[in-house]
């Protein structure tokens, strides 16, 4: 194993927001990091994400909230340079049952500065309650480019190739960090990993400046409007175990119709793009360390569902802690 002063040779498998953020944290800590990814960042599920910093479809809630609070802090700082980082601070309203007292997010509500209950006149028609908050909203294509640039500035490298096994990835490394997302289903293999399909529509923004989300934790159809520099993102869907990446015209029409019930002018807005992403879901995030069959330590960091950007920096902190423990010879690595 390489000495502490020199850092470790680390292979990060996966080039989405989880993999890149983990790689940045490791490279900036002095390790020699190479990201292995079949797809360019713009071709990952992360690039399709709406980019709102808010815990969604992720378990366990207690750890997810802690990770989210850490990411909130980092993204808030990055929002001071929006053109470079893709992060902006935007006010919005979270409505419907997601604001219930029993949704497991009480610690999140306590941690977000200035978050408050929405007044009746601030709620969309048909919504009984909600939260108002100023939160990071991330333009994901810009943010992913920023992370890649930050990684290379720290001495890390990116390699476009498909990884056929974690053992192969770790053959010439001190540590493997597995951020393969949905790919972990076959790569680990982990049958608990499955897709939650999300479809969205990007339209010309008629002047909507706030974000708005109504998303029950278990609903297959949601309503959200996210103003991004490239257009207004309308959503969405959350279809368990649906593998198709092809937009469904009928679903797209329903998404626009739901948004137009709140803002009638959206029924006439010019459509700029249709997008489909497959959220890498799991009953709970896997953030653990083990030893691969070849003996190389491996830190798993996958299964973040619909909250990748929301928890990325918090999870990266834990990855860094685990790698440091491995480096110091005291990591809890199972044989």
Image (tube, rainbow, N blue to C red):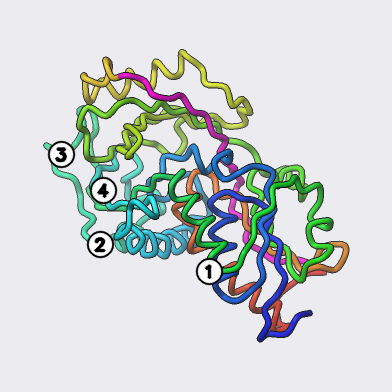
Contact? badges 3 and 4 (CB < 8 Å): no
In the image, residue 39 sits, relative to residue 294, either above or below, namely above
Residue carrying label 4? 90
Q: Pointer 2: residues within 10 angstroms few (<14), some, or many (20+)?
A: few
Give x and y (percent) for residue 11: 71, 62
Disc on the earlier residue, 2 or 3: 2
Which residue is found at the position 25% from the left and 62% from the top?
A: 113
Residue that lies at the very extreme toward the left in this rendered image: 121
Measured from the top left, where is residue 305 in percent x and y? Answer: 54, 45
Q: Callout 1: 10 Å neighbours few (<14), some, many (20+)? A: some
Distance Cα–Cα, label 2 vs label 3: 19 Å
Q: Are marks 1 and 3 in contact (CB under 8 Å)?
A: no
Task: Residue at 38%, 54% (x, y): give it.
Answer: 84
The quarter of the displayed image where residue 148 is located: bottom right
**Residue 81 among magenta residues:** no
Mark 4, other Cα within 10 Å: few <14 / some 14–19 / many ≥20: some
The numbered disc on residue 113 is 2
Alpha-carbon span between mark 4 and mark 1: 25 Å
Report the magenta stretch's main SS. strand
Location of mark 3 (residue): 122
* Dot 3 alpha-carbon crowd within 10 angstroms: few under 14, some 14 to 19, many 20 or more: some
Alpha-carbon distance for marks 3 and 4? 16 Å
Percent coordinates x, y for residue 131 in the rendering: 25, 47
Q: CA distance from mark 1 to mark 3?
A: 36 Å
Sequence-first disc among 1 and 3: 3
Quarter of the image containing the N terminus? bottom right
Tell me the SS state at disc 1.
Answer: helix
The CA span between labels 2 and 4 is: 13 Å
Which residue position holds label 1?
317
| 2 vs 4, front mark | 4
Distance (Cα) linking label 2 and label 1: 22 Å
Point out the tag, 2 or 1, that comes first from the N-terminus: 2
């Amino acid at each position: 194993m390489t000495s502490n002063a020199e850092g470790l040779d680390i292979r990060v498998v996966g080039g989405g927001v989880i993999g890149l953020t983990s790689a940045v944290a490791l490279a900036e800590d002095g390790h020699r990091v190479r990201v292995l990814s079949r797809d360019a960042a713009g071709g990952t599920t992360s690039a399709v994400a709406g980019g709102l910093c808010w815990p969604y479809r992720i378990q366990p809630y207690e750890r997810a909230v802690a990770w989210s609070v850490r990411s909130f802090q980092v993204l808030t700082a990055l929002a001071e340079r929006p053109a470079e980082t893709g992060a902006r601070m935007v006010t919005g309203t979270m409505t419907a049952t997601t604001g219930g007292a029993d949704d497991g997010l009480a610690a999140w509500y306590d941690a977000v500065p200035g978050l408050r209950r929405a007044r009746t006149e601030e709620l969309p028609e048909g919504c009984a309650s909600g939260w108002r908050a100023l939160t990071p909203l991330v333009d994901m294509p810009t943010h992913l480019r920023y992370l890649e640039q930050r990684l290379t500035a720290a001495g890390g490298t990116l390699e476009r190739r498909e990884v056929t096994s974690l053992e192969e990835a770790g053959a010439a490394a001190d540590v493997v960090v597995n951020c393969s997302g949905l790919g972990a289903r076959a790569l680990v293999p982990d049958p608990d990993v499955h897709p939650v399909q999300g479809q969205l529509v990007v339209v010309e923004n008629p002047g909507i400046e706030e974000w708005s989300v109504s998303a029950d934790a278990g609903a297959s159809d949601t309503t959200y409007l996210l103003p991004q520099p490239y257009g207004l993102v309308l959503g969405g869907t959350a279809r368990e175990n649906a593998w198709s990446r092809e937009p469904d015209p009928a679903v797209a029409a329903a998404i626009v119709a739901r948004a137009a019930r709140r803002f009638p002018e959206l029924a006439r807005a010019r459509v700029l793009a249709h997008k489909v992403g497959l959220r890498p879901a799991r009953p709970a995030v896997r953030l653990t360390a083990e030893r691969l069959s070849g003996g190389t330590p491996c830190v798993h960091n996958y299964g973040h569902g619909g909250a990748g950007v929301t928890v990325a920096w918090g999870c990266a902190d834990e990855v860094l802690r685990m790698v440091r423990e491995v480096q110091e010879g005291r990591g809890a690595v199972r044989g």
